[in-house]
């Protein structure tokens, strides 16, 4: 999985020809960290058809960027396609089945 930064976001997400999954997480978010192995497993399974990335919201200077992308709480998993956010799962909605269903919708 590619670790996104502010500098990589436009190139790797907005300009991507493939749909992009972003796992928005934070260093102090225990739920985020617990979900990572599941997301990484999905990346191994579907990574040839969907670009898997993660964005650490604990990076310095990203607060406004996260607000701009409507990331108000964690964990959040989003799908971007053709430069636009087209789907989102939030903490209450993220399960193995819901994540796999979301991935299959965009591959």
Image (spheres, rainbow, N blue to C red):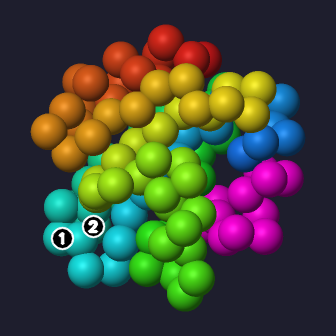
Quarter occupied by the N terminus: bottom right
Residue 107 in picture, x, y percent from top left = 60, 17
Residue 77 in picture, x, y percent from top left = 40, 43
Asked whether disc 2 touches disc 1, contact meaning CB atoms under 8 Å apart, the reply is: yes
> Which of 102/9 is in front?
9
Label 2 crowd (10 A; few <14 / some 14-19 / many >=20): some
Q: Residue furthest left?
A: 92
Residue positioned 36% across, 17% down in the render:
101
Q: Say if 94 sits above or below 9 in the image.
A: above
Q: Say if 57 sits above or below 50 in the image.
A: below
Q: Which mark is residue 30?
A: 1
In the image, taking residue 79 as reference, residue 101 lies left or right, namely: left
Name the secondary structure under disc 1: helix
In the image, taking residue 63 as reference, residue 7 lies left or right, namely: right
Q: Is residue 18 visible?
A: no
Residue positioned 49% across, 72% down in the render:
63
In the image, taking residue 102 as reference, residue 47 lies left or right, namely: right
Q: Quadrant of residue 47?
A: top right
Q: Quadrant of residue 13?
A: top right
> Which of 15/3 is in front?
15
Q: Quadrant of residue 31?
A: bottom left
What's drawn in magenta, residue-wise? 2-12
Q: Which mark is residue 33?
A: 2
Name the secondary structure under disc 2: helix
Q: Main secondary structure of the magenta part?
A: helix
Instruction: Please tell me whether residue 65 belongs to the stretch shown in magenta.
Output: no
């Amino acid at each position: 999985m590619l670790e996104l930064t502010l500098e990589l976001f436009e190139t790797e997400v907005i300009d991507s020809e493939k749909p992009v999954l972003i796992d928005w997480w934070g260093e102090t978010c225990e739920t985020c960290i617990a979900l990572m192995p599941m997301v990484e497993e999905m990346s191994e399974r579907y990574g040839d058809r969907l670009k898997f990335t993660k964005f650490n919201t604990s990076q310095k200077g990203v607060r406004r960027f996260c607000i701009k992308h409507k990331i108000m709480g964690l964990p959040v998993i989003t799908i971007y396609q053709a430069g636009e956010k087209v789907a989102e799962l939030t903490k209450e909605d993220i399960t193995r089945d819901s994540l796999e269903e979301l991935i299959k919708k965009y591959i």
